[in-house]
Image (tube, coloured by chain):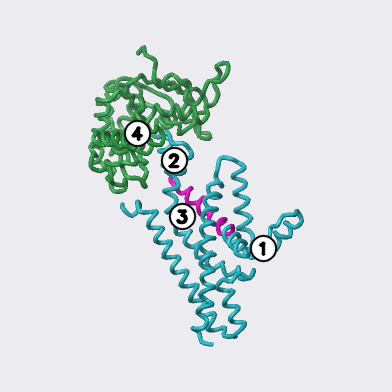
Chain colours: A green, B cyan
């Protein structure tokens, strides 16, 4: 692909103490591309999303989002130095995130969960925010739940609110961090359906960490297998999921697809 | 004299006690929030100021704080040529609220810390400013957590008001002492005073429960 990547990790390292989570990582995502990240736990896959959402700082390298450095900003004589709060806030506008545990605000109704940030952060009027919330709740099939509190909803419904809440800010990039891992099996389908619909109808760059291999095959343009803080193997879903080249990938897929062996 | 004859003066004293409790609890709550939030502020000066306040007022006796404000402060004022003689009620309210505020600040801080990290992350992802995170995400979730310990502190504060009788403020304890000196009827008077404090504590506890229910409504609707 020849276009300018919307996400670019340039030799990025991230350590927690002695443990290296991201190891000199190079990684690119094109605009509107749907990329799925798979890999064993501790491989750094969630960290990629958390670094992008500015929840985890990096130790080395540069991350670019939309061509601009995320954790750095240009100073005099074009040198990169660590980003300050205002720069991070500008950059965050480009990204939205859906969390494994939903992370809805329990003290707000569903409607206010959706409208609070657009009103306070983007400065939308109440009417504008309510209208946007109404549209998005319809999109995730929760049009009649706006006045409930998160605690009154099922996990699947809560996660759909989570998706709608992130979309309220109209990000160009959506990050999904194991969006169905905390759900009862019978509720996974309704969330995946919403995400698939989103992928089909919206011009969004999507980056997802998941263990739903069937789903990854359906919506991804590319699957990346992470191991020990690096991309061990990547390519079209059929290739990676059906005939991986690396032994580690084969082992991982075998374990995920045959959990009771 | 009959116990009914004590009612009028004791009620007068009780009214002063109620006023002292209300003023110092409200001012104390304000101090709790200011210094409880300041305790973990990003600004170092604010953090140190809060730590200093909390430790000093938790680490010294309320009685000494009261005497210091009422008897020592005016002397210092004299030395520097300013009139710092406080009215008894001002000194009383100030000492009580500074004392209760130091304990309350730790309650506020603890409750803010109990808001899950994941809420903070969601708020960052939605690009709220640190101030918006505090006011719209953290405090609304922390305040219901604060209510039971705040209830305890308010009752504690009510009982502590008895100390202000020592700077001759006419509260319930002061009136009781006055009548007792006059009549020597210790049993009746102290029993009545006991019951009156207990009654006020019951009302205060009920009020705090009501408030607790009100600020935490979203929790009971689940």
Q: Magenta segment, which residues? A: B98-117
Q: Nearer the viewer, mark 1 or mark 3?
A: 1
Q: Report which residue position mark 3 lands on.
A: B146
Percent position of residue B187, x then y: 54, 84
For the stretch drawn in magenta, the main secondary structure is: helix
Chain containing the residue with disc 4: A
Q: Which mark is residue A166?
A: 4
| First along the sequence among labels 1 and 3 | 1
Chain containing the residue with disc 2: B
- Magenta region includes residue A163: no
To which quarter of the image does residue B57 belong? Answer: bottom right
Query: Which residue is pictured at 38% across the width and 54% down the height?
Result: B216
Element type at mark 3: helix
Q: CA distance from mark 2 to mark 1?
A: 44 Å
Whether residue A178 sits left or right of residue B101 in the image: it is left
Query: Which residue is pictured at 43% across the width and 61% down the height?
Result: B208
Q: CA distance from mark 3 to mark 4?
A: 30 Å
Q: CA distance from mark 1 to mark 3?
A: 31 Å
Q: Report which residue position mark 2 lands on.
A: B120
Percent position of residue A152, x then y: 28, 48
Whether residue A258 sits left or right of residue B190 in the image: it is left
Residue situated furthest top in the rendering: A2
């Amino acid at each position: 692909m020849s276009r300018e990547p919307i996400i670019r990790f340039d030799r990025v390292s991230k350590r927690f103490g002695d443990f290296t989570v991201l190891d000199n990582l190079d990684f690119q995502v094109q605009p509107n591309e749907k990329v799925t990240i798979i890999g064993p736990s501790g491989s750094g896959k969630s960290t990629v999303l958390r670094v992008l959402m500015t929840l985890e700082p990096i130790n080395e390298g540069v991350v670019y989002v939309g061509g601009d450095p995320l954790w750095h900003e240009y100073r005099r004589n074009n040198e990169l130095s660590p980003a300050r709060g205002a720069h991070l806030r500008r950059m965050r506008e480009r990204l939205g995130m859906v969390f494994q545990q939903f992370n809805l605000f329990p003290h707000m109704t569903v409607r206010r969960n959706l409208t609070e940030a657009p009103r306070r952060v983007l400065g939308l009027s109440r009417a504008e925010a309510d209208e946007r919330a109404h549209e998005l709740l319809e999109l995730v099939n929760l049009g009649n739940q706006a006045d409930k509190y998160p605690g009154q909803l099922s996990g699947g419904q809560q996660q759909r609110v989570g998706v709608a809440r992130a979309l309220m800010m109209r990000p160009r990039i959506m990050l999904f961090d194991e969006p169905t891992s905390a759900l009862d099996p019978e509720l996974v389908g309704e969330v995946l359906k919403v995400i698939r619909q989103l992928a089909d109808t919206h011009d969004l760059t999507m980056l997802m960490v998941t263990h739903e291999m069937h789903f990854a095959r359906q919506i991804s343009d590319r699957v990346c297998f992470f191991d020990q803080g690096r991309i061990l193997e990547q390519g079209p879903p059929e290739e990676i999921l059906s005939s991986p080249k690396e032994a580690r990938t084969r082992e991982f897929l075998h374990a995920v697809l045959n959990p009771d062996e | 004299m009959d116990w009914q004859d004590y009612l009028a003066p004791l009620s007068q004293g009780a009214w002063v006690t109620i006023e002292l409790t209300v003023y110092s609890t409200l001012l104390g709550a304000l101090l709790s929030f200011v210094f409880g939030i300041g305790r973990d502020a990003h600004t170092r000066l604010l953090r140190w100021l809060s730590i200093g306040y909390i430790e000093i007022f938790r680490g010294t006796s309320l009685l000494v704080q009261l005497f210091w404000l009422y008897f020592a402060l005016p002397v210092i004022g004299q030395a520097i040529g300013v009139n710092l003689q406080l009215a008894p009620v001002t000194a009383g309210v100030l000492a009580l609220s500074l004392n209760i505020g130091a304990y309350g600040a730790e309650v506020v801080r603890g409750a803010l810390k109990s808001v899950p990290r994941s809420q903070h992350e969601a708020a960052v992802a939605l690009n709220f400013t640190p101030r918006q995170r505090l006011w719209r995400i953290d405090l609304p979730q922390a305040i219901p957590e604060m209510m039971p310990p705040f209830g305890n502190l308010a009752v504690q504060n009510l009982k502590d008001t008895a100390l202000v009788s020592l700077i001759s403020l006419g509260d319930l304890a002061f009136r009781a002492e006055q009548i007792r000196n006059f009549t020597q009827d210790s049993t009746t008077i102290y029993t009545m005073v006991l019951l009156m404090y207990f009654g006020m504590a019951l009302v205060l506890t009920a009020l705090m429960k009501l408030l607790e229910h009100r600020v935490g409504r979203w929790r009971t609707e689940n």
